[in-house]
Each structure stands twice: as C-alpha cells, then as structure tokens.
Image (tube, rainbow, N blue to C red):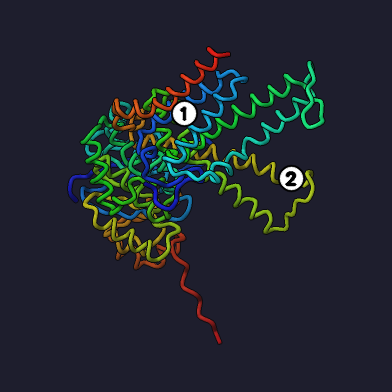
C-alpha cells in the first residue's frame, strides 16, 4: 500500500445513551485508493466517518490524517483535508445559493475575492454543475443536490473524500451519473454504502463493518463473491432454499 | 437568476430596478417607509404623491398592478380593525353618507389605512424586484449583524423543508383514516408539531456538524461580494429623498 492518508487505530466510541458504536477499529487507507465501507444499518459506518473528521471525539484509539494526529491543534487542518459528504444533502446545503454554499468552506479557510471565485468555479466544474451556481439549493433535484454537496467539499481541496450513502434514494440513471462523476474525481475516496453494485463499480477495495467492528477487508471482487460472508452481515438476501416439488 | 423556481413574491425581470444592488433597495425602501410614517395624516396630497411615486417604480420594474393588489390582501386583517375606529371613536361627530361617525376616528382610520398600504406596497415592490438571497445579501452589506442575517438565512432555507415534512406527516395521518372535522380533532396534528420541533432540532444538529466539517469557526464568512457604486446609491436614494422632502413640506404647510 502507498503511504496511508487515513490511519485509524484502536478506535472505540460509545454513544451517550450507552450504545457501543465503534469497538476497536483499525483501518488504513492509502493515497489514491477508493474504498467502500460496507455494512448493515447501525454497523457504525457513519460514526466512523464522523470520527475521521473530528466531529465526534474518540474515547479510545487514535485517528491520523496525512500524518497529523487528530487533536485540538490539528482539527482545523484535518477538517480541510477530509471532505465529508453527508447522507442528507439538505443538511449540507444551508446557504441561499449554490455558489455561496460552495464558497462557505474556502471562505472559512480565509479565501476571498478572485481566489475564492476560482475555487467555486473549479469545484462546480468537477461535478459538471457550473450552470447551477445561482440556484437556491431547495429548488434542485436530488441528484443535483448531491453533486453540489460534493462540490462544497471539493472546494476545500481535501486529500480524502468521505461519502455517506451517496446514491441512497436515487433512480438508476441518477445513480449511474453519480458513479460516473465520482470515478472521474482524482482523489482518495471512502464510500459508505450498502449498495453493493455501487461498491463494485467504484471501489477496488472494500471493508465490511458490523456491530462496530471491521469483519472483513479486501478486494471488492473477492468479498462480494463470498455469499456466506455477505448474508452473515445482512448485505445480501441469502440464496433461496430449493423447493422440493 | 434562478430560472423557473423563483419565490412567489418575486417577478422575474431585467429592469433598472431589478439591477440595482440589493443594499441600496433595502435602504431605500426602509427610508421611504419612514418618510411615509412621519408624514402628518392631514396632508392627503402628500399621500397621493407617495402613491404616484410607487406607481412609477412599479411601472419601471414592470410589476403588474394586479400582482401588487393580490399581495396587499395580507394587510387586510390589520386594516379591518382600523375600519371600526370611526364608529367606536369618541369626540366630535360628523355625518358621512347619513351615518354619524367620530371625526378623529375617521382621521385615525385614514392614517392607518394610507400608511399601511403605502408601506406594504413598497415592501412588495422590493420583494418583487429582489430575490430573497439578494435581500439577505443586501442586509449583510448594510452591516446588519451577521447573527440576524444568518438566522434569517437558515429560516428561509429550511422553512420550505419543514413545511414539506409537516405536509408528509399530515398525509400519513390522513392515509390512516385521520379526518379532522372539529377543533378537538386537531390533537394529533398539534402533537405532530412537537415531533416536527424535535426533527427540526435534530436537523439543526446535523447542519451544524456539516458546517463544522467545512471549517466553520462560529462566524459566518462574508460572502456578500462587491459593494454598490456611488451612482447606484444616488439612484436608489432619489426615491426616499423625494419622499422625505414631501414629508418635510407636509409638516411645513400644516
């Protein structure tokens, strides 16, 4: 593996209500890799993503991003380097217009004027959405909203893109378009999903989580070929039993 | 801008009024309303002039009279009360069309109706020629505290979403046989408002997380862009300028 961009070791987290969400996670993601993070509902995938960005604070274990150990001093820099694309794009797009929303991140980094404009243009260009710049986020279609949500994060020029269920609720064409957009981006990606087809077409490597632990890590083709593994972790309907008559 | 999906108060156009920077329009509308509010009610001619000014602005912005009239309906509930004042007011009585009414009550009614109509019309014209994000941007450039503009921004952004959520919850109730006929039947609807509050609160937390993820440090970045030129300020100031002159004249000749 190339030098890891993300290095998580021994990460554990318990929710305030006592539910154990992460239980000793070890994960390394190399530069340029595209990794699918698979697992049933409640496996801890989103919780893990929120840790990589420092939004949730680890109880035990550590998170390193590009050799920076996550802590109070490195938080701002790590948040710039890890671009988190949330499950519900409505949570991510809060400014009155698309252009202002894409500008929000880089403006927080101190960009302004022509440099800021440039960042917005490049980010919108990467998701082929330049023409949406002046639209209001609540007047976009679901697919457009998702693309803009990705652009808002790309505008911060992160090292890693972490996407939480990027294609949930999409029609087949929208899903295919999204896969095309993501596969064109030249950036390390961690894609949280339980859409196995999406994992297969986008990510050479997959990690399966269940019950707050990593239960499998390897080539997507190999993991998705193991029906026993998938059905044990609620990722695929078990093969139907043959009728006797 | 925003093709096809503009707000119900906005009239799409590319007129000189539409092109004026938002901060000049917000300031101008506010100053105009102040001028109207301080004009003595006896100066009926002044209110006539104000009305003519607004009609001129509407003409330039190509805003239809019926569009304005339809939106003026919103002030009716407030104004309706004013129509009672001549009947319940005390003091000297005058006869209008055979009905004895209070003289000061008639003046009070006229004062409320005229000023409310003119004030509301200027707000309608502002909203018709300026999109909501632009109005917020204008407020930001006018140095309205970012806390206020940010709250307004979020409210406008999530109001439609919350309304949609409420509609979906209502639909789900109706789909399971809920059929409110009397006021008392509204209990489930009222308790769903509580659910809506919790959901909105949780959304607030998620939005905040999304903001933190993009480097939010507690202060909204200034994305308001270029400032208005002196010429644009002068053009926008002409309207409240004339109005303030009329108001001063009305006091002078009283």
- Which residue, given by chain and number where applicable, does mark 2 sit on? B186
At x 33%, y 46%, the residue is A133
Q: Is residue A97 above or below residue A179?
A: above
Question: Foreground residue, A145 or A198?
Answer: A145
**Disc number placed over residue A177 in the picture, else none:** none
SS at badge 1? helix
Q: Is residue A243 above or below residue A124?
A: below
Does A95 sit left or right of A240 as displayed? Answer: left
- Which residue, given by chain and number where applicable, does mark 1 sit on? B29
Determine crowd level at label 1: few under 14, some 14-19, many 20+ residues with C-alpha closer than 10 A.
many
Residue B147: where, in percent of width, then height? Answer: 44, 25
> Looking at the rendering, which quadrant does residue B41 occupy?
top right
Residue A215 in sight from this viewpoint: no
Does B221 sit left or right of B166 as displayed? Answer: left
At x 52%, y 28%, the residue is B49
At x 47%, y 69%, the residue is A238
SS at badge 2? helix
Residue B117: where, in percent of width, then height? Answer: 59, 32
Question: Foreground residue, B104 or B229?
Answer: B104
Determine crowd level at label 2: few under 14, some 14-19, many 20+ residues with C-alpha closer than 10 A.
some
Q: Nearer the viewer, mark 1 or mark 2?
A: 1
Chain under disc 2: B
Classify the position of the C terminus of chain B by image quarter. Answer: top right
Does B21 sit left or right of B66 as displayed? Answer: left
């Amino acid at each position: 593996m190339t030098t890891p961009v993300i290095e998580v070791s021994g990460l554990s987290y318990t929710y305030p209500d006592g539910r154990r969400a992460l239980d000793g996670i070890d994960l390394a993601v190399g530069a340029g890799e595209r990794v699918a993070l698979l697992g049933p509902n409640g496996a801890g995938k989103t919780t893990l993503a929120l840790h990589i960005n420092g939004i949730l604070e680890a109880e035990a274990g550590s998170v390193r991003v590009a050799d920076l150990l996550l802590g109070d001093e490195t938080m701002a820099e790590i948040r710039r380097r890890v671009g988190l694309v949330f499950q519900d794009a409505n949570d991510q797009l809060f400014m009155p217009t698309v252009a202002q929303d894409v500008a929000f991140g880089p403006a927080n980094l101190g960009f302004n004027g022509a440099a800021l404009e440039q960042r917005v243009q490049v980010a919108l260009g990467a998701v082929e959405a330049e023409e949406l710049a002046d639209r209001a986020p609540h007047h976009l279609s679901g697919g457009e909203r998702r693309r803009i949500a990705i652009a808002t994060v790309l505008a911060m020029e992160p090292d890693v893109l972490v996407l939480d269920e990027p294609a949930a609720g999409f029609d087949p064409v929208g899903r295919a378009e999204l896969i095309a957009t993501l596969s064109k981006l030249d950036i390390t990606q961690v894609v949280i999903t339980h859409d196995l087809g999406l994992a297969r077409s986008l990510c050479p490597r997959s990690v399966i989580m269940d019950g707050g632990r990593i239960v499998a890590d390897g080539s997507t083709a190999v993991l998705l070929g193991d029906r026993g593994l998938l059905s044990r972790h609620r990722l695929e309907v078990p093969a139907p039993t043959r009728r006797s008559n | 801008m925003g093709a096809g999906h503009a707000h119900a108060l906005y009239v799409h156009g590319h007129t000189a009024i539409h092109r004026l920077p938002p901060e000049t329009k917000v300031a101008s509308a506010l100053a105009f309303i102040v001028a109207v509010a301080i004009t003595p009610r006896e100066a009926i001619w002044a209110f006539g002039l104000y009305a003519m000014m607004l009609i001129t602005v509407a003409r330039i912005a190509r805003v239809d009279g019926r569009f304005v009239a339809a939106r003026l309906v919103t002030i009716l509930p407030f104004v309706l009360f004013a129509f009672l004042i001549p009947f319940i007011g005390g003091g000297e009585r005058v006869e209008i069309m055979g009905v004895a009414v209070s003289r000061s009550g008639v003046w009070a009614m006229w004062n409320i109706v005229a000023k409310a109509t003119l004030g509301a019309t200027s707000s309608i014209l502002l909203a018709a020629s300026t999109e909501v994000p632009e109005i917020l941007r204008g407020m930001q450039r006018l140095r309205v505290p970012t806390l206020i503009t940010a709250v307004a921004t979020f409210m406008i952004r999530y109001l439609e979403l919350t309304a949609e959520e409420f509609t979906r919850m209502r639909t789900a109730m109706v789909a399971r046989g809920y059929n409110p006929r009397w006021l008392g039947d509204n209990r489930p609807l009222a308790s769903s408002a509580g659910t809506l509050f919790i959901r909105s609160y949780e959304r607030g937390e998620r939005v905040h997380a999304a903001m933190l993820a993009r480097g939010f440090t507690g202060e909204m970045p200034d994305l308001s862009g270029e400032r208005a030129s002196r010429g644009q300020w002068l053009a926008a100031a002409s309207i409240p300028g004339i109005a303030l002159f009329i108001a001063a004249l009305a006091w002078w000749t009283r």
